[in-house]
Image (cartoon, coloured by chain):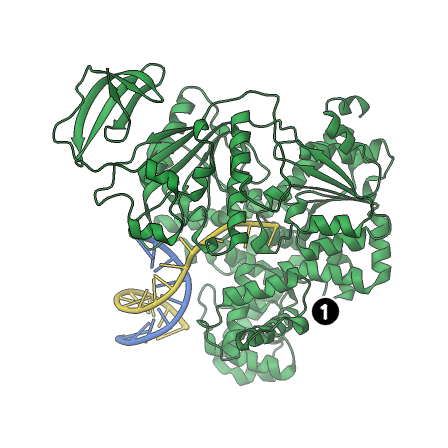
Chain colours: A green, B yellow, C blue
Amino acid sequence: MDNLIELLNPQQQRAVAAPSGPTLILAGPGSGKTRVLTYRIAYLISVMDVPAWNILAVTFTNKAARQMGDRVTKLIGPQSDGIWLGTFHSICGRILRREADLLPVTRDFVIFDADDQESLMKEILRESNLDEKTYRPYSVLAAISAAKNDLIEPENFLVNNFHDEQVKRLFALYQQRLVRNNAMDFDDMLVYTNRILEDFPMMREVYGHKFQHILVDEFQDTNYAQYSILRNLARQHGNLYVVGDEDQSIYRWRGADYRNLERFKKDFRNVEVILLEQNYRSTQIILDSAMSVINQNSNRTRKKLFTKGTTGDKLRLIIAEDDREEAQLVVTDIRDGIRSGRNPSEYAIMYRTNAQSRVLEEAFRREGLSYRLVGAQRFYGRKEVRDLIAFLRLIYNPMDEISLRRTINLPPRGIGEKTVESLAAIANQSGLSLGESLLELTQPGNPALISLGRNGERLARFARMLKAWREAAFAESLSSLFDRVVLDTEYETYIRDKSEEGQDRWENVLELRSVVMEYETQGLQEFLEAMALVADQDTLPETLDAPTMLTLHAAKGLEFERVYIVGLDELLLPHSRSRDDEEDLAEERRLLYVGITRAKRKLTLTRAMRRRTPYGTYEDTLPSRFLKDLPAGLVQEDFYAQPRRNGYPREREFSKWERPSWLRDTRVPLDKPVNTRFKAGMQVRHATYGHGVVKSSKLEHGDETVEVYFEGHGLKALIASMAKLEIL
DNA sequence: GTCAAACGCTTTTTT
DNA sequence: AGCGTTTGAC
């Protein structure tokens, strides 16, 4: 360990060997914070003799946790066994299962994901006779989530108007219903854990004592509930070691509150603050660009990012005609790089919204290149996958009404809405949950069964199936339970029609089965918990050697040799949903900052002059306001786009925002050439590319396109009216 | 209860 | 444009 520490720079060493007590590591991007955290854990165990089981380390994703665990093991071996290492949600899950006696739910609670939440909220709205248009399930849930992240209970929900009043009511109802389903949502995991620590001094004592040292990564993205949990745990010993960077706070919309940094300094006295500024990742040009973007944000501590590495290449800004061309240009560029011998996994393409991945995927397919797409939706959002997980959830917790309603007629077995409602009526009368009263139907001669008539028989058949599965869940392995469900429901015939999609769907089922196999030794509960808590980054197939596509959010904490950030248009980055709010805009800027700082060697930004709207039509775009904050001298522009036929840009669009002065300079004169000004063989000079020879020139869309061969840059296609080409 | 056609709405980011 | 949901026919 001692000799390993010598590999660190002095700041990092200071951070790793910091004395116990509250410690705040302010770490710029690429400054080795993951390294510092892993070394710190190793240091605690092997130098300070802290037993592994007295350490709690919280990361942002499960993948980060896994990596950290692996690295610590590499450093100090099996001594590290027993650390509690995971995301807030997985750690809380662990605590909650242990202390379920203190909860309004049983140990077998399930976790409701966004979809389940929405189904439940829709049901509640229906029952409350509230209109889904006025009370959008999504926004009601967002309000509830925001409250929970701030540890606000339904009773204390702040009300300004009638609408809020209703939301408050829905909040209370929603909580009741979750309990009735023996379920909790993501936020509840934090809220309940905090309540256990807050309401039971004994628990605070037990866990505070157990976790002698608490380490937290990505602290800037913790919300208040998470902070409160940490504060409660570290109350006695104050050994809270947090790492963060306010400039990389990108989850405000999810309740993240970078003021936790201030709270931390205030609540714990004598916080030792250590700065990590030296960057080991990027070239100086990338760092300079990142700084000039982020420095436009106010209310932050200015940091100087520096590297002892190279200056690096200029950034490239590609301006394409439309989003399809944008995607094509990026993919072609990557293809060329791979052909010239670069490793495919050096490349990453980042974008603001998931929808943007589509054109890119198409471009990759056109080129016959494989790619890695980060995003949980890809697999776990599939209907067939969710269906089967719903069966397993129901088996585990029959009180889960959402899963019951989802599966009871799946594949269709003649149990319609009405039948379910009559069962619900029976359940209500006996004060049982839907699932419990369903299971009662397995008893022959049950009066409820008789009252249901023929529908009762159908229900009873499903009930007997469910009962058998529940017994199998105890007696058999997870995979044989899975197989049983698929067989008993004849799920294969249901989804595997002759179509190609049918085949795909069945393959998804098989893929899910292989995931099930991984939990064979652990069991149903662990499997379901893992399914509920999979993060997007967790789905990144690490073995595939291919370019990665991911959102800017998902890119946090990662690094790549060559990064493309696409879609640098107004309304996309910054996103249209953030344009009215100063704080939201600042966050969009941080998002770009995070993206820029992922690049180690080469950064390319792209934008398209026209883009398909989510609506299907094409619309003209405006350049992202962030582009003008890049140091002009560090950017090399590649204009592929043709000047706009109807003038560029349109005046009216501009008045919406302040007219960016820099744009005026790039405006295109609209005089249409009749003859080509350039002829093959002409010697020309270009501001960036230098000396070149014209290969060809032709009129296209009323404008002259010149192909020029430049020394050292190769063949370039240029728009004559735009590229300032000088004839020699 | 099921199927198909019309309808209408959507996408910001995710543990 | 494409999807999920509602509507209407059997």
Q: Is residue A520 visible?
A: no
Residue at the spot 75% in from the left edge and 55% down from the top edge: A229
Tag 1 secondary structure: loop
Q: Nearer the viewer, residue A249 or A61?
A: A249
Q: Which residue is mark 1?
A: A104
Pointer 1 indicates a residue of which chain?
A: A
* Location of the N terminus of chain A (image quadrant): top right
Few, some or many residues within 10 Å of mark 1 (<14, 14–19, 20+):
some
Residue at the spot 35% in from the left edge and 18% down from the top edge: A713
Q: Nearer the viewer, residue A601 or A57?
A: A601
Horizontal relation, residue A165 to residue B4: left or right: right
In the displayed image of the protein, which residue is found farthest to the left? A674
Q: Position of residue A35 (x, y in %)?
A: 69, 32
Q: Nearer the viewer, residue A101 or A20?
A: A20
Q: Is residue A332 visible?
A: yes
Q: Position of residue A589 (x, y in %)?
A: 51, 44
Q: In which image quadrant can residue A716 be found?
A: top left
Horizontal relation, residue A478 to residue A551: left or right: right
Tell me: residue A458, above or below residue A656: below
Q: Position of residue A64 (x, y in %)?
A: 64, 40
Q: In which image quadrant can residue A194 be found?
A: bottom right
Horizontal relation, residue A448 to residue A354: left or right: right
Q: At label 1, which amino acid type do we have?
A: Pro
